[in-house]
Amino acid sequence: MSDSLVFHFDVDGDNFTSAGQASTQVKKNLRQLGLSPAIIRRVSIAMYEGEINMVIHANGGTADVVVTEEYIEIVLRDSGPGIKNVEEAMQEGFSTATDSIRSLGFGAGMGLPNMKRYTDSMKIDTVVGEGTTITMRVNLN
Amino acid sequence: MKISMIRDLLDAEVLCCEESLDNDVYSACGSDMMSDVLAYVKDQAVLLTGLVNPQVIRTAEMMDMVCIVFVRSKRPSEAMISMAEDDGIVMMATEKRMYDACGTLYINGLIGAKAVHV
């Protein structure tokens, strides 16, 4: 694997049923590359949580995954409402999700903390009213 | 514990992937909140839940789980069964409630996974 591989996905914000399809595809792609199951699981869980967040809070967006020899980078971009208080949003249990979202099994305030937990680095760029970009990396070595 | 024993202990109906009933599993978790499943447990093979939507299967897939048990007589849609079939995940449904189902499996040797963060 000498060159970087790039996967791009559009995440549909109108369809909760299809949320997670991009993460599922990335997991399959990483398996084909022969990466370790532990790495694949960390990447796919972090991306899956991010994908769910985009659908719940931001009416979808895009996901780009770059695989290099050193790391896997996941960039999630949306044009949603932005995050008013990132520090607060990073606390386990904090959520602005509605009861209807909770009834679907999400919105427990674990999404962002889980994304941070499963990656080696996570950066949140957010502007209220404009959108959010989250960049996560999982190191391969 | 073999997956077939889970079926027997819970008097459950197998909905797909019967060919995998002879596989062994060593731990399980029970939750209706998928983010909690994704956060607090790892290396568990069985998910017991009363939640019925496609994200249950996606969560199990992300966690490399091999069996989903729907409690309280919940029934997944045909589309969900098809998804699980594609992923090779055994799905079954039991009339037992969550507490009873988890307790039954636990006392018969299927422990919970350690709450270990990666």
Image (cartoon, rainbow, N blue to C red):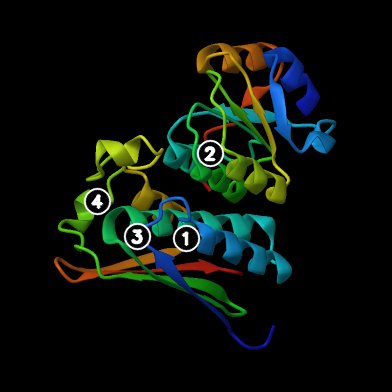
Q: Residue at x 62, y 19 (%)?
A: B94
Q: Residue at x 74, y 31 (%)?
A: B25
> Which numbered marker is on residue A54?
3
Asked if the residues shown at circle 3 and circle 1 are in contact, with their CB atoms under 8 angstroms apart, the answer is: no
Mark 3: give few (<14), some (14-19) or many (20+) Cα within 10 Å: many
Res. A131 visible in picture: yes
Q: Quadrant of the N terminus of chain B?
A: top right
Res. A34 visible in picture: no
Residue position marked by numbered label 1 in the rendering: A47
Mark 2: give few (<14), some (14-19) or many (20+) Cα within 10 Å: few
Chain letter for mark 1? A
Q: Position of residue B55 (x, y in %)?
A: 50, 45
Residue position marked by numbered label 4 in the rendering: A89
Please check whether the numbered discs 3 and 2 fall on a single chain.
Answer: no
Please check whether the numbered discs 1 and 4 fall on a single chain.
Answer: yes
- Looking at the rendering, which quadrant does residue B114 occupy? top right
